[in-house]
Image (cartoon, rainbow, N blue to C red):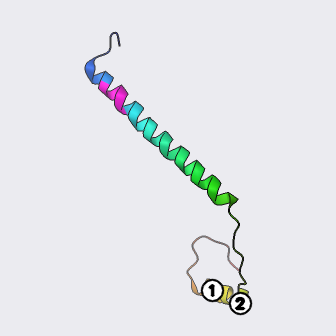
């Protein structure tokens, strides 16, 4: 590159490499998410009363209060 110091060239290459790594992770995560949302979710019966008791015993973390 004309007018660019060797230190700047190295910095540019590091930025390019870092950005490429981030893009690779983003694409991999998007593909994994796509696979996940296409899977059928297994449904099971839930004891709603037990869930309410569990919720009442937990400290509230900014959620809805009943």
Picture layout, residue 21 above or below residue 33: above
User: Crowdedness of circle 2 by 10 Å Cα count: few (<14), some, many (20+)?
Assistant: few
Looking at this rendering, what residue extends furthest in the top direction?
Answer: 2
Residue at 63 percent across and 83 percent down: it is: 55
Residue 12 in the image: state x and y as whole percent.
36, 26
Number of the front mark, 1 or 2: 2
- Quadrant (top left, top right, bottom left, bottom right) of the N terminus: top left
Which x, y percent locates residue 4?
32, 15
Residue 26 painted magenta: no
The spot of residue 46 in percent (x, y) is 71, 84
In the image, the segment drawn in magenta is 10-14
Q: Which labelled disc corresponds to residue 35? A: none
The residue lying at 50 percent from left, 40 percent from top is 23
**Which residue is under mark 2?**
49
Residue shown at 45%/36% (left/top)? 20
Residue 62 figure quarter:
bottom right
Label 1 – label 2 distance at C-alpha: 11 Å
- Read off the residue under disc 1: 56
66 lies left or right of 6? right
41 in relation to 57, above or below: above
The kind of secondary structure the magenta stretch mainly shows is: helix
């Amino acid at each position: 590159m004309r007018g660019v110091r060797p230190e700047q060239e190295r910095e540019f290459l590091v930025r390019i490499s870092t950005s490429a790594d981030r893009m690779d992770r983003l694409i991999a995560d998007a593909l994994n998410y796509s696979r996940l949302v296409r899977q059928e979710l297994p449904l099971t019966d839930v004891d709603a009363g037990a869930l309410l008791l569990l919720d009442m015993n937990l400290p509230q973390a900014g959620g809805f209060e009943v």
